[in-house]
Image (cartoon, rainbow, N blue to C red):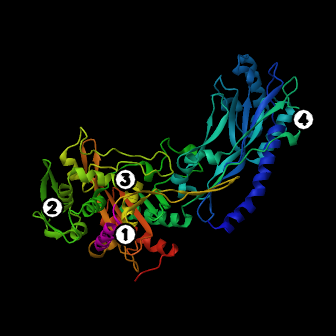
Amino acid sequence: MKEQSLRFWVVAFAPALVLGLALARLVYLAFWAPEVVFGVQAREIRLEPRRGSILDRNGAVLAMDVPRYRLVLEYLPIAYGGDPRRREAWLNRIDEVLAPFLGFSLREAAAGWPDTWWQFPVARDLPEDVARGVARRVQEAGLRGVRVVPYWARMYPEGALLGPVVGFVVFRPDPEGVERRSGAVGVERAYERDLAGRPVVVRVPVDAEGRPLPLDEAALAEPEPGADIVLTLDRTLQAIVAEELARGLQESRAARGDAVVLNPRTGEILAMVSLPGFDPNHPETLPRDARNPAVQDLYEPGSVFKILTMAAALEAGVVRPESRYLDQGCVEFGGAPICNWDAARYPQGRGWLDMTELLVYSRNVGAAALARMLGPERFYPALHAFGIGERTDVDLPDEAVMRVRAYGDPDWREADMGRQSFGQAVSVTPLQMAVAVSAVANDGLIMRPFVVREVHTAEGVRRTEPQVRRRALSAATARALREMLAAVIEREAVKARVPGYRMAGKTGTAQIPTPFGYDPKGTIASFVGFGPVEDPQVLILVKIDRPQRSPWGSEEAAPVFARIAARILPLLRIRAGE
């Protein structure tokens, strides 16, 4: 992150935040008027801290706190056995004073107030002039148990652009009905402890009727604000990826899609887009299962998985790039038929092909032949080396993972291995697939993916360092496979070509499993690629669900990959090689 950009942000916003804290403290005390509770000489109030901001890698603000006001009713006696008729009279008096000014009935707003709660919010997001007007009327009428409470509200300047990744904040009541903020989904949830800050609980003296007595301002400790977090994501790259993915969905008339861009050398996630997304500024409108599909949703990847099968076969030495096999239209594997995707056009297959041609023409029968050569004793350890069937350990919550049916499991059948070799009967998330293929781009090393680059605390800066998880294959095998995948784009997946750059990649067209077998109509079209081939610095995965124009990854996902790469490679200062 550019220090100058971050310094500007701090200078611009710090005075406003300090002023907001001071205002919050003064208004909180000035308008606090608890109901009488005999024998109580003091009450505790909680001063909430500013939640830390979230910035992109260049200092653009993605999430920040702004001061807002809410109207809260408090009635201690009813929560601890008070007279319900007294509460009724109290609510009537409040309605008489405030309803004409606010334009709604506070009695009706408090209709759902549980008897076990002593506090109940009846309005949020009050403008400052309205908040001051309410406070003045409360004071003039001598109302007790009505408070205008300043609070920090969360604002997301980029709206839906980063919603699933950044997440959002929600207010949740504690057992007594006092609302507390906490992160939900994405970075807001994963880094809750860092972002939340530390509140201050103050005991405020009260008189015999429960009114607050003067309190020395100097005696009030300042709440400790939360840490600011800098992401690996680039807001500009995110916008480009979102724009091109949206275009791809519109052109293919697809239901939804995902895209992941990462640095295969470090594991830094540069962009992560899922469409349709959601606007975190309005969490109350979101479904309960609001999520980040790139991390939380599983799918069968289809032919992009052949990259891993080929890597395993090359690494084990059972084939070399020039090795040949007899391609047939259909074969039997473990008692089940396996056919090429174009078996209707080539019922006898394409004849003798080498390993590069196996990938170029995306042969299911060829992938199954490689699995048979490897055998289960070598096939499944190779998948494990690529991280298939386990979490990537990304610093985002609720990462999904599905157990891979493997040799030795009671439910494993030999036919499973045949289908798994070309991406069926195995499920991954978009991020897991991208990370697995990144090993080919990174000379065989699997890096831990991450979205948080730095955490800025009062004690200093905590940086995330790139971390090697394991070696999936040798550097020599990775380099050989990169050339084979470059041939896929140069000879067949021509819509994935990027002018000026030599890229490598693989198409995928996956059937969609249902409880009644595979969907006969819908597919998931995908493309995963990286480059430049000689020095891979960026990897892009594009996944499009249920395209209507064409079912093929080469037709729908590959062009989106090419457009994204053509726009972001120059921005990343990756020089063209041609």
Task: Tell me how far mark 3 sits from mark 1, CA to CA.
Answer: 28 Å
Task: Tell me how far mark 3 sits from mark 2, CA to CA.
Answer: 32 Å
Which comes sooner in the sequence, label 1 or label 2? 2
Q: Which residue is mark 1?
A: 559
Task: Tell me how far mark 4 sits from mark 1, CA to CA.
Answer: 68 Å
Depth order, front residue of 314/327: 314
Which comes sooner in the sequence, label 3 or label 2? 2
Q: Which mark is residue 214?
A: 4
Q: Residues within 10 Å of mark 4 (few under 14, many from 20)?
A: few
Q: Residues within 10 Å of mark 2 (few under 14, many from 20)?
A: some
Q: Is there a contact, CB below 8 Å, between mark 4 and mark 2?
A: no
In the rendered image, the vertical position of residue 17 relative to residue 174, given as above or below: below
Query: Disc 1 marks which amino acid?
Result: Pro
Residue 362: image quadrant is: bottom left
What span is colored magenta in the figure?
473-488
Q: Is there a contact, CB below 8 Å, between mark 4 and mark 1?
A: no
Q: For marks 3 and 1, give the one nearer the viewer.
A: 3
Task: Give x and y (percent) for residue 342.
Answer: 18, 63
Q: Is there a contact, CB below 8 Å, between mark 4 and mark 3?
A: no
Judged left or right of residue 32, residue 426 is left
Q: Which mark is residue 57?
A: none
Query: What residue is at 78 percent from the left and 52 percent from the top?
Result: 18
Task: Give x and y (percent) for residue 378.
Answer: 25, 53
Which comes sooner in the sequence, label 3 or label 1? 3
Q: Secondary structure at mark 2?
A: loop
Which comes sooner in the sequence, label 4 or label 3? 4
Is residue 476 covered in magenta?
yes
Query: Disc 4 marks which amino acid?
Result: Pro
Judged left or right of residue 91, residue 363 is left
Q: Which mark is residue 343?
A: 2
Query: Disc 2 marks which amino acid?
Result: Ala
